[in-house]
Image: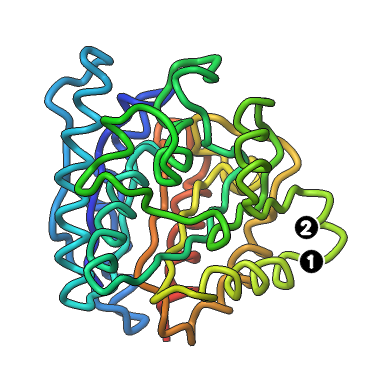
C-alpha cells in the first residue's frame, strides 16, 4: 500500500493540519499495520513552498499538480494508495490524477465523499475564501480554472457518480450547486434514520455504476468531535467513530476501490491520541486482514 503525504494547511482555516502527515509518518502506525498484515510505504511527502497563506492559490495548484501526477502513475500501475492530509484541497490532485488515467480508456471515476462539509464552494460563493472548502466543486468542473484544469481541462467527476455522506454544516451557495447538479447528499438525520452501513452501501453502488472504479475521500470532521477531536473545523452531532469503522468494512471486498484519502487531521488539537487511533482503525477496517 502506497502512502502519499500532503503536508499542507495553506488552504485551511487552521494550518496545523499540515503536521498531520508528519505526525503519522513518525508514529508507530506503520508497524501496527504491518503486524496486522498490511504492508505500507511512504512514497512522497508534499510540502508547500511557503508556510503562510502567501500565494495560496499558486501553492495549492503546484502541490495538487504534483499529487495528480503521482496518483495518475499509481492508477496506471493499478496500485491502491492512501493520501494522508493535510487540508482537503488535496482532493483536487488526488482524484484529478486518477480521473486523467481513467480517461485514457474513456472510463469514468466514482467518488464517495464523507465529510461534515460539502466542500463545494467557488471563489464567488465562499464566505471564508479558504480553498479547502472548494475541492469537490473543482472536481465537478466548477470554480477557478486553475483548480478545475489540473492535468486535463475536463471535469474529473460526473454528478451521478458522486455521493456525500455526513453533511451537517454548509452554506446555501454550495448546497444549491450540488442539488442543481444532482449529487446525492446524505445528511445526518437520514444517516441516523437508515443507518450508516445502508447509506454507505448505496453510495458505493452509485460510485461503481457506469465507472471503472471509485475512491473514498474521508474528512475526519465527518466524525463526532468526541471521537475525532483533532480536526480544524469540528462539527457536533457527527458520525460515531465506531460506527464509521464498522461501516467501512464494506470496502474490504471492493476490487473497484482505487484509493482513498484521509484528511484534516490536526495533531495539535488531538486529545489522548483519539484521532490518531481512529485513523489506525479506519485503515485497518478497510485494508487489514
Quadrant of the image for the N terminus? bottom left
Q: Is mark 2 on a helix, strand or loop?
A: helix
Tell me the quarter of the picture where residue 129 sits: top left
Seen from this angle, which residue lies furthest right?
193
Residue 173 is situated, as x and y percent measured from the top left of the image, at: 63, 25
Residue 119 is situated, as x and y percent measured from the top left of the image, at: 52, 36
Residue at 28% in and 47% down:
93
Disc ID at residue 195? 1
- Residue 157 as seen in the image, left or right of residue 114: left
Residue 176 is situated, as x and y percent measured from the top left of the image, at: 67, 33
Tell me the quarter of the picture where residue 168 sits: top right
- Callout 1: few (<14), some (14-19), or many (20+) C-alpha neighbours within 10 Å? some
Q: What element carries label 1?
A: loop
Between 184 and 193, the one nearer to me in the picture: 184
Quadrant of the image for the C terminus? bottom left
- Callout 2: few (<14), some (14-19), or many (20+) C-alpha neighbours within 10 Å? some
Disc ID at residue 191? 2
Residue 161 is situated, as x and y percent measured from the top left of the image, at: 53, 63
Between 63 and 20, the one nearer to me in the picture: 63
- Residue 76 as seen in the image, left or right of residue 177: left
Q: Are marks 2 and 1 in contact (CB under 8 Å)?
A: yes
Amino acid at each position: 500500500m502506497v502512502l502519499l503525504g500532503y503536508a499542507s494547511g495553506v488552504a485551511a482555516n487552521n494550518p496545523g493540519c499540515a503536521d498531520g502527515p508528519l505526525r503519522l509518518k513518525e508514529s508507530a502506525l506503520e508497524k501496527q499495520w504491518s503486524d496486522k498484515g498490511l504492508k505500507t510505504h511512504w512514497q512522497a511527502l508534499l510540502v508547500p513552498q511557503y508556510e503562510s497563506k502567501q500565494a495560496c492559490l499558486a501553492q495549492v495548484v503546484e502541490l495538487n499538480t504534483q499529487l495528480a501526477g503521482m496518483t495518475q502513475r499509481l492508477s496506471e500501475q493499478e496500485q491502491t494508495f492512501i493520501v494522508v492530509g493535510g487540508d482537503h484541497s488535496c482532493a483536487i490532485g488526488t482524484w484529478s490524477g486518477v480521473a486523467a488515467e481513467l480517461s485514457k480508456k474513456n472510463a469514468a471515476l466514482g467518488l464517495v465523499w464523507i465529510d461534515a462539509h460539502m466542500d463545494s464552494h467557488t471563489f464567488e460563493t465562499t464566505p471564508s475564501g479558504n480553498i479547502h472548502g472548494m475541492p469537490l466543486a473543482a472536481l465537478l468542473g466548477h470554480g477557478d480554472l486553475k483548480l478545475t484544469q489540473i492535468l486535463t481541462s475536463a471535469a474529473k467527476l460526473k454528478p451521478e457518480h458522486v455521493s456525500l455522506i455526513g453533511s451537517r454544516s454548509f452554506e446555501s451557495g454550495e448546497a444549491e450547486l450540488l442539488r442543481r447538479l444532482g449529487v446525492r447528499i446524505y445528511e445526518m438525520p437520514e444517516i441516523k434514520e437508515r443507518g450508516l452501513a445502508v447509506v454507505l452501501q448505496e453510495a458505493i453502488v452509485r460510485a461503481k455504476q457506469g465507472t471503472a472504479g471509485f475512491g473514498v475521500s474521508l474528512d475526519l470532521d465527518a466524525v463526532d468531535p468526541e471521537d475525532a477531536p483533532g480536526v480544524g473545523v469540528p462539527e457536533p452531532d457527527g458520525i460515531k467513530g465506531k460506527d464509521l469503522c464498522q461501516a467501512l468494512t464494506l470496502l474490504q471486498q471492493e476490487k473497484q476501490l482505487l484509493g482513498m484519502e484521509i484528511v484534516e487531521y490536526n495533531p495539535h488539537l488531538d486529545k489522548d491520541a483519539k484521532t490518531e487511533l481512529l485513523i489506525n482503525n479506519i485503515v485497518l477496517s478497510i485494508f487489514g486482514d
